[in-house]
Amino acid sequence: MDPMPFIDAHSHLQDPRLAADLDGVLARAERAGVEAVVVCGTAEGDWDRVVDLCRTRPRLVPMLGLHPWHVAEARPGWEVRLEERLRVSGAGLGECGLDFAREGGDRTVQEAALRHQLRLARALEVPLALHCRKAWESLGRLVREEGLPASGALLHAFSGSAETALEMQRLGFSLSFGCPIADPENRRAAKVLPEVWPDRLLFESDAPDLPPRHLESWPPDAPNEPAQLAGVATAAARLRGEPLAHVAGLAHANARRIFARWLP
């Protein structure tokens, strides 16, 4: 029996932690039913690696953005260079966003960088991938002021409350979930997953990050892989009280809609 089809809506396959066994990572993903993997750049230093990787490997979707963790170190003129790479490569925009959970971050600079990328995603009409931690009010304000691209926008590794999930969906976001929702101790996920609208549900690995550490068999230092999406889907189905095939089908259809221009 063939595995259910999945699309990994957010990963970092360009990460050096995966380089030594990238062929194995992709082979295991294919055996697990993963049809495509979205690969997100986070800083100017990895934009070219993302583009080159997606150009040379089948069914990898490129996204390029300036992550809030890297805003402070960005060289002047990054906005122009990002737009040039997006236009030339045809990539989507992300990972960008806001992170007020880390000490020392300049919130004003983060907001200015995100505002620029929101405008750029709309101008180019490309999908958008965002990171948000403890900055939901600011994110909502910026999105209400600037809007989202009609092609789609997702909040990756969503970790907000059920109330925040509803608000973000009303603003136009899809919500993407990874291995943490499969942790039995994750009580928030049990409240959030039932509130996700059928046309806004996505699954991701965030590889090599967010591995399924709740599994006793998982090696402590092993990087995450797209092949883990089946476990994410199983957890989502359990939390939503719906059949696995139905939930997996929703997420697959949603990802195909957002990333249609890159998929056969």
Image (cartoon, helix red, strand yellow):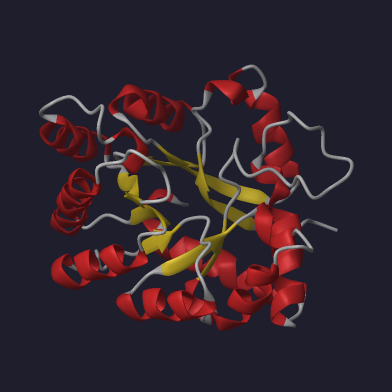
Mark yes or no: residue 67 visible.
no
Closer to us: 34 or 224: 224
Name above or below for residue 81 compared with residue 127.
above
Residue 216 in sight from this viewpoint: yes
In the image, 172: left or right of 102?
Answer: left
Extreme-top residue of the structure = 20
Tell me the quadrant of the picture where the N terminus can be found: bottom right
Instruction: Please report the residue visible at 49 percent of the width from the left and 68 percent of the height from the top.
Output: 254
* Percent of width and height locating residue 239: 72, 75
Q: Is residue 19 above or below residue 229?
A: above
Query: Which residue is at the front of the view, 197 or 28?
Result: 197
Horizontal side of residue 53 vs 123, given as left or right: right
Total numbered labels placed on residues in the image? 0
Question: Could you say where residue 151 lies in the image, as x and y percent from the top left?
Answer: 30, 64
Q: Is residue 154 left or right of residue 15?
A: left
Determine the residue positioned at 70% across, 34% down.
27
Q: Residue lying farthest right?
A: 217
Q: Residue 85 appears in which quarter of the rendering?
A: top left
| In the rendered image, the vertical position of residue 246 relative to residue 218, given as above or below | below
Image location of residue 142, percent across then percent down: 20, 64
Name which residue lies at 37% across and 25% down: 46
Residue drawn at x 70%, y 70% as measured from the top left: 187
Residue 47: image location, x then y, percent: 33, 29
